[in-house]
Amino acid sequence: MALHLEIEAIQKVYPSESPEGRVEVFHRIDLSVDPGQFVSIVGPSGCGKTTLLRIVAGLEARTSGRILLDGRESEERDRRIGMVFQDYALFPWRTAVRNIEIGLEIQGMPQQKRRSLAMKYVRVFGLEGFADKYPKELSGGMKQRVAIARTLVANPEVVLMDEPFGSLDSQTRNRLQDFLLRIWRERKDTILFVTHNVDEAVYLSDRIAVLSPRPAAVCGIFDVALERPRDRTGPEANRIRKEILELLHRPHTSPVTF
Amino acid sequence: MNWKRLAPPLAVLVLWQAGSTAGLIPGFKLPSPLQVLGGLADLALRGMPPGHRLHVHVLYSLERVLWGYGLAVLVAVPLGILMGWSRRVRDWIEPLVEILRPIPPLAWIPIAILWFGIGIRSAAFIIFLGAFFPVLLNTVSGVRSIDPLLIEAAQMLNAGRRFIFLKVLLPGSVPSILTGMRIGIGIGWMSLVAAEFTGVRQGYGLGYMIMTARDIQRPDEILAGMLVIGLIGLGIDGGLRLAERRLVRWR
């Protein structure tokens, strides 16, 4: 059951020591993610991609604007949203399978039922033989698979991913991208994915939103209407990548005068 | 077992024994290792004072430690978690801790005797003070050193405050708590022996035992008593290390 996510006129202002007394991270961000759609946000580093995701997650406050799920705004943190973190955020004292099942434990599912469901995810995520290992005994790629399984098994209706493959080497990263697409094709989750890697965004997404530097705004939306599995270096992928890179490198600030 | 590590103490023992046998070390000040062994046998079989045998002294001392230390852990761990969890609780308790902590546990002995008289309650109180602060401070720092990301991860899975407290903060601070418990029992055990110097009502306790041996000029028994005190401290520390390794395999 995937939901429609709307990010409506999000503004974020921090108080600061600067002469203006405030730093505006976003003036106004609007973005819509259809049910079952895979949308990526790319942007220069420091533009506030992660901040935006944390605002949608309800981990950080917004100055104004609304987050709507199927047209409904939630008072507090919306419990229908799940999140995958860049640094995995696994509980180091729990084995892989006990990390995966923790969301079910929170939901109050009886021990046997949640364990068998978690074990199903262990198999689907290719973690057989590692169910009883502690996070310190797992590789980065395996840790992130555990983290993704932990988020998905709890069945959120919108999944946020904050540069989940950012700290992996490029081969592991490519493998996990394919893996994520396979899982997503089965489940059709609504995914909002943050990355600074344009190739990754083009390979994975249905739609890409490009953010400008601070104060960030959506400065471009690209629909990637390519069949999957995609050719990472096909002409159409290259064309979109080129356009996005040009947009990212265009100077947005007023030109420097000497 | 690393046999190489045994060589230096063995060499010291041999030299010591040789010095004593050759008459270079006065026996009334420092008896030879063999005499100390004899003293140990006397303590175990005849007792000091006579009839008060070693194993009973050990049991009395352990009982006092168990009370003082057990209470310290029972109070310090929950309080420490609360202090780590809530800024308000921390702001209230921390200044009190800062004032009380630098006072050595032994400096409390006179007031402890005034409050509790001479006996197990006084001794347990001194041990409580010795063990309490290390356990408390390590628990607080354990809770505070938990990665906030883990708390957010739990929140994103819709965990409530109770779940976060019991299933994130508590297990996450176990390594620190165990470190505090090890430091605490060390200080507690040292304080106990000194607390027993000031007198015990039942006539038992390792500290009391070696003070009695001093009163009747038995340096061999003093040293044998010191040896037992050290070995028991070593054993307790070893036991806690073992527990630590078992409980925090994930580290």
Image (cartoon, coloured by chain):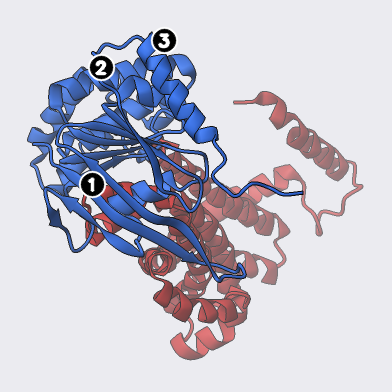
Chain colours: A blue, B red
- Give the number of the disc on residue A254: none
Disc 1 from disc 2: Cα separation: 24 Å
Quadrant assignment, res A233 = top left
Q: Are marks 3 and 2 in contact (CB under 8 Å)?
A: no
**Is disc 2 on the same chain as disc 3?**
yes
In screen coordinates, is B222 left or right of B166? right
Disc 3 from disc 2: Cα separation: 33 Å
**Is disc 3 on the same chain as disc 1?**
no
- The x, y position of residue A96, in whole percent, is 30, 30
Give the crowd class for mark 1: few <14, some 14-19, many >=20 residues within 10 Å.
many
Whether residue A101 is visible here, answered yes or no, is: yes
Query: What residue do we see at 59% from left, 26% from top?
Result: B1
Kindly identify which residue carries mark 3: A233
**Is disc 2 on the same chain as disc 1?**
no
Query: What residue do we see at 67% from left, 25% from top?
Result: B3
Name the amino acid, label 2.
Answer: Glu
Kindly identify which residue carries mark 1: B157
The one of B70 and B224 positioned closer to us in this rendering: B70
Q: Is residue B47 above or below residue A112?
A: below
Name the amino acid, label 3.
Answer: Thr
Query: What residue do we see at 55% from left, 56% from top?
Result: B183
Q: Chain of mark 1?
A: B
- The x, y position of residue B31, in whole percent, is 77, 51
Q: Are marks 1 and 2 in contact (CB under 8 Å)?
A: no
Say which element carries label 1.
loop
Quadrant assignment, res A155 = top left
Kindly identify which residue carries mark 2: A128
The one of A102 and B96 positioned closer to us in this rendering: A102
